[in-house]
């Protein structure tokens, strides 16, 4: 039985006392490890929820095609592109650090594989959490209100010409920033406009929204906030700031 989304706008609601985190935590651990795993050992990740569980904001058919066809194809082509080359012994982190010198097939499919794995983990049918603690403070210091951060993120996502991604990142100084990238690039790449660790991202390729929203990308972006897993984003923030301190 599907759990109904009662909280359509989590930004303005008081979080419920019960919030189940184990699944997200497990996924995050595997995602963090993913960046430092040898590419030849990378596995295609599980989707942490059912195709229909982000309805009505992201429809089941889009989720199914997006995960089983698009993400799967990035993974398969990435593995094929690195096979029997020196790249298969590298980690994703090492690979993205030399992205500007990689063959297009390795760069694009490696980015596509990683970006989608991150994307699935910052979405959830359970949306009862809100930014809290030091993460909420960092948002306030950088952007003002949460809504101001979302507005800037929405503009980056809406204005990304063609296909690409918008990101909330933590930069090398542990400051939050918003950026966007074309194609399957991401802020880990050595030639990114603004470099940093992505902690939240939105896929604005048409394959992410066209079936339900057609050309209305802003409607998809607005709907996206209804299924953002703030607990996972906040955990990404803490993991990142901690690793920058180590
Ligand atoms: Fe995608």
Image (tube, helix red, strand yellow):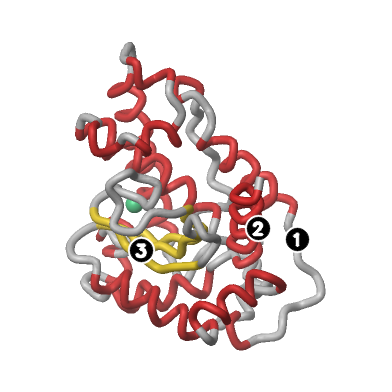
Q: Earlier in the sequence, mark 2 or mark 3?
A: 3
Does residue 175 appear in this view?
A: yes
Percent of width and height locating residue 31: 56, 42
Q: Earlier in the sequence, mark 1 or mark 2?
A: 1
Q: Of tags 1 and 3, which is closer to the observer?
A: 3
**CA neighbours of label 1 inside 10 A, class few (<14), some (14 to 19), many (20+):** few
Give the numbered dot on residue 238. Answer: 2
Task: Give the secondary structure at mark 3.
Answer: strand
Q: Of tags 1 and 2, which is closer to the observer?
A: 2
User: Gap between marks 1 and 3, in whole Å?
Assistant: 27 Å
Are the residues flagged by discs 1 and 3 in contact, CB closer than 8 Å?
no
Q: Is mark 3 within 8 Å of ligand 1?
A: no
Does residue 73 appear in this view?
A: no
User: Gap between marks 2 and 3, in whole Å?
Assistant: 20 Å
The residue located at (65%, 42%) in the rendering is 29
Give the numbered dot on residue 166. Answer: 3
The residue located at (73%, 57%) in the rendering is 21
Q: Considering only vertical position in the picture, is 229 above or below 89?
A: below
Percent of width and height locating residue 85: 31, 15
Task: Give the secondary structure at mark 2.
Answer: helix
**CA neighbours of label 2 inside 10 A, class few (<14), some (14 to 19), many (20+):** some
Disc 1: which residue: 20
């Amino acid at each position: 039985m599907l759990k109904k989304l009662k909280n359509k706008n989590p930004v303005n609601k008081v979080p419920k006392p019960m919030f189940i985190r184990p699944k997200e935590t497990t996924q995050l651990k595997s995602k963090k490890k993913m960046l430092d795993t040898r590419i030849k050992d990378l596995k295609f990740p599980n989707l942490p929820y059912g195709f229909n569980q982000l309805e009505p904001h992201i429809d089941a058919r889009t989720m199914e095609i997006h995960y089983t066809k698009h993400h799967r194809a990035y993974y398969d082509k990435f593995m094929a592109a690195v096979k029997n080359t020196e790249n298969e012994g590298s980690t994703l982190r090492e690979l993205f650090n030399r992205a500007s010198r990689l063959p297009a097939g390795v760069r694009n499919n490696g980015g596509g594989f990683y970006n989608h794995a991150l994307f699935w983990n910052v979405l959830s049918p359970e949306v009862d959490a809100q930014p809290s603690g030091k993460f909420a403070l960092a948002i306030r210091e950088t952007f003002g209100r949460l809504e101001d951060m979302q507005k800037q993120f929405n503009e980056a996502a809406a204005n990304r010409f063609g296909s690409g991604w918008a990101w909330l990142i933590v930069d090398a100084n542990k400051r939050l920033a918003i950026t966007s990238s074309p194609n399957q690039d991401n802020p880990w790449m050595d030639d990114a406009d603004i470099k940093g660790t992505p902690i939240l991202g939105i896929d604005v390729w048409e394959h992410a929204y066209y079936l339900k929203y057609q050309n209305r990308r802003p409607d998809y972006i607005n709907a996206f906030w209804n299924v953002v897993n703030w607990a996972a984003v906040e955990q990404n923030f803490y993991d990142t700031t901690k690793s920058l301190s180590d």
